[in-house]
Amino acid sequence: MDMTSLKEMVDTLSAEGYIHTERVKEAMLSIDRRDFIDELLSNEPYVDTPLYIGEGQTISAPHMVAIMLELSEINETSKILEIGTGSGYNAALLSFLANRGAVFTIETNRVIYNRAVLNLSKCKYAKNVVTLLGDGSQGYEKNSPYDRIVVTCAVPSVPEPLINQLSDNGRMVIPVGSMDYQRLYLIEKNSNKIKKSIMADVIFVPLIGKFGFK
Ligand code: SAM
């Protein structure tokens, strides 16, 4: 494990203002991004870019991960739904932050899902993660409502089931737009009122599914 480079990555994200809480900093220092990347696909785990993880998919850039974690304002007991498990890296970070809560993460691609299960099984901090195979665009009603919903693939519009599965005082971060360009929305639910704020211009891989792209 190259601690110097991991520390450099986190220090740079802090200096650039992407990380601004101690908890997110601690999480990103504790979960090594390298452990979620196949070294045959990339030998630069700490560069601030998305990296290929196979099957046409990517692990998001570290600054994007930091933005989404900070916006989510996760606490130790949060119950979280993540859509788009990918490598499992973000699920591990969510698990670290919500260490007395629960993380449900859904992936639609079976090959990617199997790799994520393996990656997460080797991560000592990811003890409260439930991995699910399926179409996350419909959420996961069984364990709803969720205090936090984090969507790591792009949708054309916010899926109604996800709004319904968000708890009161819940927060959702989700990239909304076209196949090749989106805006990152922060959605807050308070007393059944929904507030949508645009937080950043982003580019995510598309969500494929009932409420996603065809
Ligand atoms: N969070 C991931 C990580 O930490 O590596 C990165 C996720 S990657 C940017 C987006 C993932 O969303 C891909 O693995 C893709 O297969 C998945 N995906 C696309 N449509 C989906 C759907 N309907 N339900 C669940 N996952 C989906």
Image (cartoon, grey):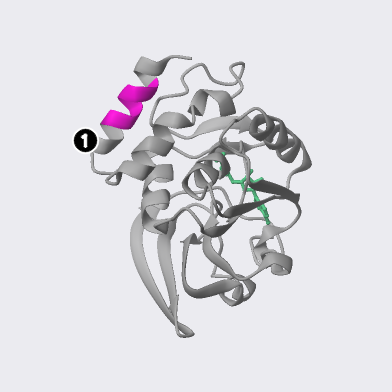
Query: In the image, what residue occupies the spot 71% across and 36% down?
Result: 117
> Alpha-carbon neighbours of circle 1 within 10 Å: few (<14), some, or many (≥20)?
few
Give how far across and how far down residue 122 sits, in percent.
Answer: 65, 27
Residue farthest along the left direction in this orientation: 15
Residue beneath disc 1: 15
Q: How many marks?
A: 1
> Assess mark 1: CB under 8 A from ligand 1?
no
Q: Which residues are magenta?
A: 6-11
Residue nearest the viewer, comparing 123 with 38: 123
Query: In the image, what residue occupies the spot 58% across and 29% down?
Result: 36
Give how far across and how far down residue 102 sits, in percent.
Answer: 60, 54
- Above or below, 96 relative to 42: below
* 212 left or right of 12 in image: right
* SS state under label 1: helix
Q: Main secondary structure of the magenta part?
A: helix
Q: Is residue 67 magenta?
A: no
